[in-house]
Image (cartoon, rainbow, N blue to C red):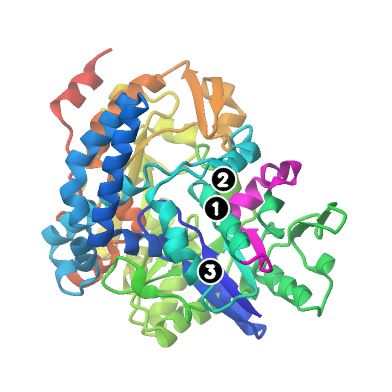
Amino acid sequence: MRVSVVFPNSLCLPNPMYHSLPLLAAALKNAGHEPRIYDLNAMAADLFLNRQRSEMILHGARQLIEQLRHQGQGGEADRLTEMLAQLEEKVLDGENCKHILRDRVRCFDQPLFKKAFWTVVDVLGFYYQLDPVISPHRENFGADMIAQQVADPWSPVRDLYEEVFLDSVLQDAPEMIAISVAFPEQAVEAVRLARLLRARKPSLHISMGGPLISLYLDKWLTNNWIFEFTDTICFGDGETAIVELVAALEGHAKLEDARNFIYLNANKELIRTTETAYLEPMDDLPIPDFDTADMDLYLTPGPVYPLMISRGCYWGKCTFCSIGWRENYRQSSSDKIRADVKDLAERYGARYIYMQDSSIPPNGAKNLAQIVKDENLEVHWGGGMKFEKALLNPEYCQLLGEGGCKSLLMGFESANQDVLNLMEKGYDLNDLPQMLKNLRKAGVSAELLWFIGFPTEDRQDVMNTAKFLFDHRADFGLTAFVGDFLLHPDTEVFKNPEHYGVTILSQDNDHCEYVVSTGMQPDEVQQLKNMLSVNNNRTLVCNGGHLPHLVESGMDLSGLERPMTIKPEVVEFCRQE
């Protein structure tokens, strides 16, 4: 069977390919089917960063501004006018910047890269501002999703479906569409894609799965609304499930025997084929297959391949983190890691690998590094890792460096140990300087992520955090201020607010109004965030755009980032009682 495996638009700068796509493709291919991968988020960026399209969109934006004024929405019209004045030159330069980021020579000119990268970030943000994000945490999620599909207001993204997306996904005459939904930004886009595909080709079997569906299954199934747009819903892991579904669609098995699926039968009764989601043992997963993926769509000078050696989170305790992303932890064996990384190096010539684990397990990182070293593979990798005691061992860090590790994204969060303890980060701040020195000496760049406003944190804590970063700036690569603490419904803080001195006032979508008994109130945090937001390097470090620079140009990343500076007004604000 021909199957299109699709990652919907996630309304952001393209990151390395989502790892489920090559895994699903591999499972289908190994079973004798014909999968093809489509990353619509990467495709959208490629289309938007085009001079002719940019001119068309700017023309449409001016027409929209006139409509808003005619409708009496002067405030919104003024906002868009101001944004247009600030970004028009960048928008028209988007195509040139795209080519710079893909160029194997010009990309490594740091000033040129910096201008191109941050221009692209701003341009895509401009294009995506009209597209709504409807989270499953919204009380009337299903009704709001249906209303959004009925209204279907214009945005630059909407035009891409009829112009490009549908024809691309249907080009091989697939008999099934598998849509993988991972993030809240994809909810509206995934359903829009399913709706338009169903209208274009009613005979298609459309199946939808992924973490955003598995974690909030009840919201997708309320009043069975989702089955207006899809035929089956997959919950839990999908690699074995999708093969069993295709077998049922071909008449070789019964649909009710395909694990991890929910559907409506002929009598419109909800059928759940598995009571508890089947979770794949990591060693049973196929070797990822990228044969049908367009790796040239991404904004890097060479393909950055995804790899996962664990699912869930081995630590699983951080109180601000989504509980759903922490559950059901599993890890690959050394043999499985060896098979996957050797295949990337030998079949695809992979030079850059970005780990998509929630947090790379320390023993898993050691195994990966040892394999890369022993097999003499010319691959270089980075990913997210927690500060652990192992990093106090210079020999451990040296092995990581010798085994291809170039960058580790690390949750520093705060320079207040009490705040770290309340977050349950599980590391001693006093150990951090030595860990950073060990990594740096081993040739591994640590990229430090931090945020403000966790309950009990005060203004002086923020200044202490900034000072710590400044004092130790020679021992890490990039620092990324990722914003303010968001009280997410799927966190320990939300579930036990009293323990953190939090009083929840209201909830709308993913946004919670709250006050704290100790520390900065949310409105203070917001003021401080606005002052610090110009230093936000989160997009750069999470995108992995810095990894090729570490490999090809060395450890100095200072020419890529928005510099970490604390303006006088921030100091004055933090000194106020």
Q: Judge the density around disc 1: few (<14), some (14-19), many (≥20) Cα neighbours within 10 Å.
A: many
Residue 132, percent from left and from top: 46, 41
Closer to the eye: label 3 or 2: 2
First in sequence: mark 1 vs mark 3: 3
Q: Is residue 397 above or below residue 129?
A: below
Residue count near mark 2 (Cα–Cα under 10 Å), binned few <14, some 14–19, many ≥20: some
Label 3 sits on residue: 21
Q: Earlier in the sequence, mark 2 or mark 1?
A: 2
Inspect the magenta stretch and tell me whether residue 571 lies in it.
no
Magenta span contains residue 211: yes
| Real-space CA distance between mark 3 and mark 2, rounded to the nearest whole angstrom | 26 Å
Q: Quarter-wise, where is residue 272 in the image? A: bottom right
Q: Nearer the viewer, mark 1 or mark 3?
A: 1
Quadrant of the frame with the N terminus: bottom right
Q: To which residue does mark 1 refer?
A: 192
- The residue located at (16%, 74%) in the rendering is 105
Mark 3, residues whose alpha carbon is within 10 Å: few (<14), some, or many (≥20)? Answer: many
Using residue 8 as the reference point, say whether residue 384 is left or right of it.
left
Name the kind of residue labelled 3 in the image: Leu
Report whether 10 appears left or right of 240: left
Which residue is labeled 2 in the image?
149
Local secondary structure at mark 1: helix
Q: Which residues are magenta?
A: 201-225
Q: Are marks 2 and 1 in contact (CB under 8 Å)?
A: yes
Give the residue type at disc 1: Arg
- For mark 3, give the secondary structure: helix
Among the 4 quarters of the image, the one containing residue 419: top left
Who's the residue at 31% across and 51% down the image? 124
